[in-house]
Image (cartoon, rainbow, N blue to C red):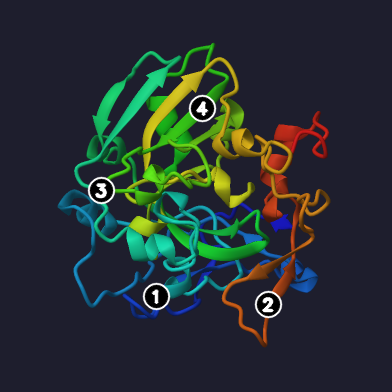
Amino acid sequence: MLIKRAQAGDIRSSEITSETVFHERRQILKAMGLGAVALGTPFVVGATSGERQFYTTQAPLSGPAWLQNKLKTLTPGQYSTRESATPFEYVSTYNNFYEFGTGKTDPADNSQNFVTDPWKVEVAGEAELTGTYNLEDIVNPHTLEERIYRLRCVEAWSMVVPWVGFPLANLLKRFKPNSNAKYVRFETLHDPEQMPAQGSRFAAIDYPYIEGLRIDEAMNELAFLAVGVYGNAMPNQNGAPIRLVVPWKYGFKSIKSIVKIEFTKRRPKTTWEMSNSREYGFYANVNPDVDHPRWSQARERRLPTSIFNQNYVETLKFNGYAPLVAHLYKDMDLRKQY
């Protein structure tokens, strides 16, 4: 995959997929890189300083008032893709969020009354500044941007999603992690009254949901904290009100509904690693050369699909983001440290 960090003027506006549920058409950035086109590969670009049209809405922006105000100042992000964005109705109804059920439509069906305002996030561990903060105080110092990333599920399906948020590194630096901070641990809300599957005796995994990154992974420029999709606030089923997005890793690493961020000395044990370490490793880097024990990872179904068009595409190493992340793993055997 070719990746380019563009300067102002390198990009022209072009339409991508129309979002058919809440929005009319919106102009987004499209790369010019002809070499990438010739190879048939995705292309990630930087943002231009020129004017840009946003989605127009037929209804008020969702989310609390402070977030609605920030969404009105949304800017184009540094990274985009040549590929068409997955239509919103798929992004919002085909989800893995086991706290609301294991079926793909369960999160949308069962999360409508999930309360995400007010919301607090605890910052703990090996840092100079720790404490519990209102979500508004977490988000407000940061400029919201849109980044269009590929999302690759370990189940071998994928999407292209226009996320709204800000770089994870920008948040972490505010709390001044010390030299003992080798990892960042994330935790999802544990509230069985609101998240029915957490209280089920037949729960597929143990709760609360835990994920983690090495500190250098967390500080990588692609790691992103998202508070919305398609120019609007994050739907409950997609991880409202704030979630992680690490596009070079399988989707289960992108933890949803975050309530705790902790800097740690030791590598945290993550939920799927604890559930089945043979199938789900800590790193979870997208790798077509390392199959899941029960299926191949060489190809993926790019949503939307149908019975007559499965829409298979070849999976790229690190989900196509290798030029920006491969150096993080240069001394590792990715067949063993998966």
Front position in the image: 75 or 333: 333
Residue at the image position 48 percent from the left and 13 percent from the top: 178
Q: CA distance from mark 2 to mark 4?
A: 36 Å
Instruction: Write down the residue under mark 1.
Output: 26
Q: Position of residue 219 (x, y in %)?
A: 54, 32
Residue 233 visible from this viewpoint: no
Dot 4 or dot 3: first in sequence order is 3
Q: Quadrant of the C terminus?
A: top right
- Amino acid type for the residue under numbered disc 1: Arg
Instruction: Write down the residue under mark 3.
Output: 116
Name the element at disc 3.
loop
Dot 2 or dot 4: first in sequence order is 4
In the picture, measured across the screen, residue 109 lies left or right of residue 330, that is left
In the displayed orientation, state which residue is furthest to the left. 65
Q: CA distance from mark 3 to mark 1?
A: 27 Å
Dot 3 or dot 1: first in sequence order is 1
Q: CA distance from mark 1 to mark 4?
A: 35 Å
Instruction: Write down the residue under mark 2.
Output: 311
